[in-house]
Amino acid sequence: MTEKIRLATIWLDGCSGCHMSFLDIDQRMLELAEKVEIVYSPLVDAKEFPENVDITLVEGALGTDEDIQKIKKIRENTRLLVAFGDCAVTANIPSMRNPFGADATLKKVYLEHESLNQQIPSEGVPALLPQALPLHQMVKVDLFVPGCPPSADTIFYTLSELIEGRVPDLTTLSRFGA
Amino acid sequence: MTNDELLALTEQERAEEEKYSHRIHICTGTGCVSSHSEKILETFQAEIKARGLEEKVKARQVGCMGLCAAGPIVSIQPDGLLYREMTPELVPAIMDSLGGEPFKDQLIDTNIPFFYRQEKNTLENAGLIDPERIEEYIAVGGYAAVVKALSEMTPAEVIQEVHTSGMRGRGGAGFKTGLKWSLVAKAAGDQKYLICNADEGDPGAFMDRSILESDPHRVLEGMVVAAYAVGASQGYIYVRAEYPLAIKRLKIAIKQAEKLGLLGQNICNTPFNFKIDLRLGAGAFVCGEETALMSSVSGNRGTPNPRPPFPAQSGINNCPTLINNVETFANIPGIITDGGKWFARIGTETSKGTKVFALTGKIKNTGLIEVPMGITLREIIYDIGGGIPDGHNLKAVQTGGPSGGCIPAEYLDATVDYESLKQLGSMMGSGGMIVIDDTSNMVDMARFFMKFSMEESCGKCIPCRVGTTMLYNLLGKFQAGQATRWDLKRLEELCDLVKNTSLCGLGQAAPNPIISTLRFFRQEYLDKLIDSEKTGETVE
Amino acid sequence: MNSNPVVRSFTIDGIQVSAAEGETILEVARQNDIEIPTLCNLEGISSTGQCRLCMVEVKGTNRLIPSCATVAEEGMEIVTSNERIDKYRRMIVELLFAERNHICAVCVANGHCDLQAMAQKLGVTHIEFDYLHPSFQVDASHPKYEVDHNRCILCGRCVRVCDEIEGAHTRDFRNRGINTLVITDFATPWGESQTCTSCGKCVHVCPTGALAEKGKSVAEMQKRRQFLPYLVMRREGAK
């Protein structure tokens, strides 16, 4: 292999559990490191999402306007976009606010349930979307890896297959909620 | 009641009728009643009394005369004059005109295609007799079919006559009536049931209501003949509670028929017994579907069940059950008295007889019409209907209600029969015909019907329950100009799913308004895509 | 019992099978270990044909029929799976996920849910329809059980088991279309039901986490359905 696969990972509206599960592949990380270069990730230092990325694992739903900008940029610069875990695939936990809407959620959390300093934060934080959305409602997604989180084995298998240029068959390995 | 008694009653009624030099008929169908025609009837009666003409002039309530757009309608017999938009204030002027020159201001020209192009069969008595008097029905030949069938024909002969007529169900699907009857007749079991489906629910359809309001005995007569043919002893009329006038007149009609021995025990002094009860629908469209209807009649939640078993094998109380629509039964008396061949002389090779349509929408002559099968849409819309008002152009004709489709103007010369409408992606349906002009958008139209189907979905099966909601929402995206090519693809896939996997006819037919408008008016969908999607490649 | 029962021979996916009179295609398939997916059907309670997942094709026709509610006929050639059927099944499961708030990660039935397992088996990796996100109530008025309508797929199993096996008919449907709701008695809170015997059969036949025992946390609500064939056997034996 002449050039390493350029891999990026990112978490949007999620809990980082999928990234934790990714780290759970343990020593297999070394195996992976021989074949991929992690060009952008919460685990590395790059500040700007780079160009010309081969694979991006996106954890988390789209919850804010900032997430929308990020996912568009990711899509523009990624060949293979993977919805990584249930929040990215179904909007999962972030979507639990959807039946009530963003305003009611903010009021409940920051006003009704707060005894001190009641205020809805508006400065320095991105605005909530009316509904938390799964990635594919905004951009084209190439592969869906459900799971909350997907197991380390599932993640390793998925990446190994993608690196080899194959489409992983996840039917028995992952499901919603697992 | 024997034939002789029937004839005697007829003689007596006719003699009574001939006493009057003029008979004033006031329409008391729902359309005209809602513009206070009952007040007009009262005013006529009072005026006749005031002028001391009780022996010479008679004012009576009658059923629908068809030209609802001009209601309330009053007709003067035997002159055959028709007056439009009557009010109580105009009554004296009409009274003054009796025997002299007609009152020109309100006179309707009856020499127009609306009248002479129609061919009335099931509506032949509508507007001529008082629907609340069985004597008047008998005087125009009513119940002769019952007497004939019971005294001169075997059940098999009755069914044969219906076979010969080529009659097909008027409820929409067009199943051969004779075949259905013979299936129920052949089905094993001592107890059989008969149901008249009067749960007319299509938006813009009021054929059955008019028949029941104008000539309820005709339907009862058809039911008695059918019950005799298939061996049913209990009948139900499932009529929606939103038709109070039809219900009232049916109740009166059943009582009258029972009193004269035309219904109940030992009908016409034969061993044949047949009882009819009313069952009122609570307003669910799905209860027009036969299995849901039977659930409702049995006192259960009105939701459909898989077929087979078909009602003919296992219906009410798991007994063989015959279900026909109001208009189907209303066609039976003629077939028995005049013969199946007489009936089959009208229509096309595969669609016989006449069909009642409720003509609504952007058309001059809104109303109820009865036309021979095989007539063209052009004749219905431009001759009978008088064309499109306000200088607009015809865009499409919607037939078959929420289960049907839109037929574009270029197919105006298509004939109205079961096959040709189906070929055009629509259906005969029960007879609603909505005329659409160039001011309407077809996406809006499709969404209107999808809203109806979504709200009327019973919720039992998933494709219909959730699919219709998703279709409605997707069409909303088009309306808002936010749809993508991908949404268009999804729309088509979803139509395919709902059509092929829904449990009952409601769901299976629910996507038809979208499928047919996509077929003929695809550009209107494309025009509503978001700007960046209007041109460019299709989705993979 | 007829002393000379009629046996009907037909094929399912090319396998020669036979059915006693009145047996459905699904029943025969199960006897022969041929799997046909379904969410509303359960051995021991009546078939209603409402989930539409068990639709199969009769070879030579384009029409799909519900195998749970269609009696096998001599000479039928049944196809239980092909591209078209599989696509429809996936879409139906997607519609269910989009209809209410099925969030497996926080569900009591996670790992023990028929809907979740069905999605996995059919290869549904994501939902292409826009989620409806309705807002349904949880009724926790019963001392032992609770119902979360957000997780209900309206399969009617609870309604039928209560009516046909327990004989209480506590549960039924109200409203229609997308607003359909399973209710107890005349839409009274479950805890105030006059007819509920608290037997719990409904909870255990429920395919999802809609009906659950109280006190169960995420993924703890295992469904035990062994009682159903036993009770049916006792009932049949009593005849």
Image (tube, coloured by chain):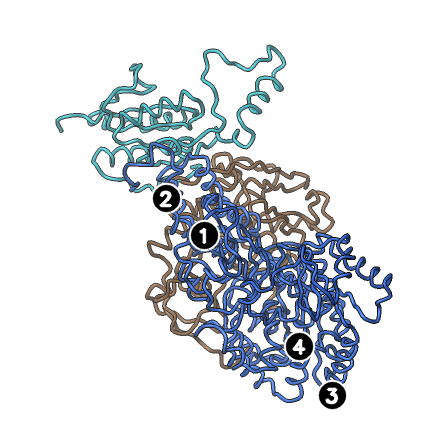
Chain colours: A cyan, B blue, C brown
Please check whether the numbered discs 4 and 3 fall on a single chain.
Answer: yes
Q: Quadrant of residue B334?
A: bottom right
Q: Quadrant of the C terminus of chain B?
A: top left
Local SS, label 1: strand
Local SS, label 4: helix
The label number, if any, that marks residue B396 in the structure image: 1
Query: The disc numbered 3 marks a residue on which chain?
Result: B
- The disc, 3 or 1, on the residue closer to the chain's N-terminal end is 3
Query: Comparing marks 2 and 1, which lies closer to the viewer?
Result: 1
The label number, if any, that marks residue B4 in the structure image: 3
Q: Label 2 to label 4, Cα distance in Å?
A: 52 Å
Q: Label 4 to label 3, Cα distance in Å?
A: 19 Å
Which residue is under mark 2? Answer: B523
Say whether marks 1 and 4 touch (CB < 8 Å): no
The label number, if any, that marks residue B224 in the structure image: 4
Q: Say whether residue A90 is left or right of residue C146.
A: left
Q: Quadrant of the N terminus of chain B?
A: bottom right
Q: Position of residue A33 (x, y in %)?
A: 23, 24
Q: Position of residue A140 (x, y in %)?
A: 33, 34
Say whether marks 2 and 4 touch (CB < 8 Å): no
Query: Comparing marks 4 and 3, which lies closer to the viewer?
Result: 3
Please check whether the numbered discs 2 and 1 fall on a single chain.
Answer: yes
Query: The disc numbered 1 marks a residue on which chain?
Result: B
Local SS, label 3: helix
Q: Label 1 to label 4, Cα distance in Å?
A: 40 Å
Q: Position of residue B159 (x, y in %)?
A: 56, 81
Query: The disc numbered 2 marks a residue on which chain?
Result: B
- The disc, 2 or 3, on the residue closer to the chain's N-terminal end is 3
Query: Comparing marks 2 and 4, which lies closer to the viewer?
Result: 2
- The disc, 2 or 1, on the residue closer to the chain's N-terminal end is 1
- The disc, 1 or 4, on the residue closer to the chain's N-terminal end is 4
